Image (cartoon, rainbow, N blue to C red):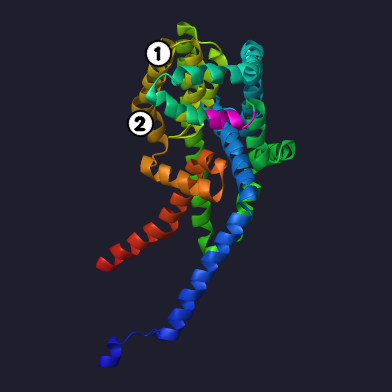
Amino acid sequence: MSSAFQNPKKEKTFSQKVWTAGFILALIVALFLIFTASIHVFILILVGALIACYFRGLARFIESKTRWSSKLSLILSFVSTILFLSGLFYLAGSTASSQYAELQEKFPEILEKSEKFLEETEIGKKFTVYAEDFQQSSNLESSISKFFKTTFGGIGDIFVILIVGIYFTISPKVYRDGIIRLVPPKNRKRSKEIIDKISKGLTKWLLGKFFSMSLIFVLTAIALAIVGLPFWLILSLIAGLLVFVPNFGPIISAIPAILVALSVSGSMAITVIIIYLVIQLTEGSIITPNVQNRLVNIPPALIILAQIFAVILIGVWGLVFATPIIYILRTLVQELYIKPMEKKAEESFL
């Protein structure tokens, strides 16, 4: 009678449990070391995957509206993107490049004027410490060049990103199926569903980001042009691009605009600060909740924590790509751990 209620599975001994726990811990440490050692490659693959998500997402949108074939829609996504970028460069490229060159040339002078103005106030004296550190970090062009080269290794890695993105875009099924084949046959269907969910989520996230970036660029350009701030176009472009970096991007984008405004006058600086505050509050309270959070909802606190850890592990680009990284990890945890655990809990109550 008592044997009927005995657990048919033989329980592990204490030593076996210790060895199992040790093996799991060693595996986690090994995976972490491999991840940190190959993080550079991981970033390249992630950026290539994001490029593929963009073109594939745009192709699906064209296909849904026109009922054309997937191949034709994909070709149109490439062509329309190239035409849009070419037209944008034709209309504003010369102005932006000339403003950038002039800003680079006059940036030391702008910092000097801003520093003199700030030294007249107590708060300004504290701010000049940052300005001096920024000035000592060489000129604007070399700083930006170093920013890209230290992570992507210059033109070579950009070329790799483009090639990876193109191949991922043209034949994503080949690479997806290759990953799925690494999974045991009984779990391959579920693996395909998870990969497709991550792909669709990243596409929606990119859609929301591009919408926010475009809107912030337009609003900032109009506002700065109206008040007559020098270098308004390149500063607006910086503001739009840095929307891609959540939480910290808008703050960073406001710094050069405020410095330029300080070199003009104190009233101009106050006006620019108000403009940036209004636009960023609008983006944070209206655009993000009503557009991006409806597409991919990630808790803001989770993004900030992810950015902090990503910066420690990856560097500056961890700040940039923390959101897609945390989205991928969050989806994997939900699909591979939380949902199976909740399903087992529900079955145990039945």
Real-space Cα distance between discs 1 and 2? Answer: 26 Å
Label 1 crowd (10 A; few <14 / some 14-19 / many >=20): some
Q: Which mark is residue 271?
A: 1
Q: Which mark is residue 28?
A: none
Asked whether 45 or 81 is in front, the reply is 45
Callout 2: helix, strand or loop? helix
**Which residue does the image show at 47% across and 20% down from the upper left?**
258
Q: Which residue is mark 2?
A: 289
Location of the N terminus (image quadrant):
bottom left
Location of the C terminus (image quadrant):
bottom left
Label 2 crowd (10 A; few <14 / some 14-19 / many >=20): few
Please tell me in which quadrant of the rendered image residue 124 appears.
top left
* The magenta segment: 132-138
Of callouts 1 and 2, which one flags the residue occurring earlier in the amino acid sequence? 1
**Which residue does the image show at 62% across and 16% down from the upper left?**
106
**Which residue does the image show at 53% across and 13% down from the upper left?**
232
Above or below — where is 31 with respect to 92? below
From the viewer's perspective, is 88 left or right of 335? right
Asked whether 330 or 18 is in front, the reply is 18
Residue type for callout 2: Pro
Residue 254 in view: yes
Instruction: Please identify the dominant SS of the magenta region.
Output: helix
Pointer 1 with pointer 2, Cβ within 8 A: no
Callout 1: helix, strand or loop? helix
Percent position (x, y) of residue 282?
Answer: 36, 22
| Number of marks drawn | 2
Above or below — where is 336 with respect to 283? below
**Which residue does the image show at 63% across and 22% down from the upper left?**
80
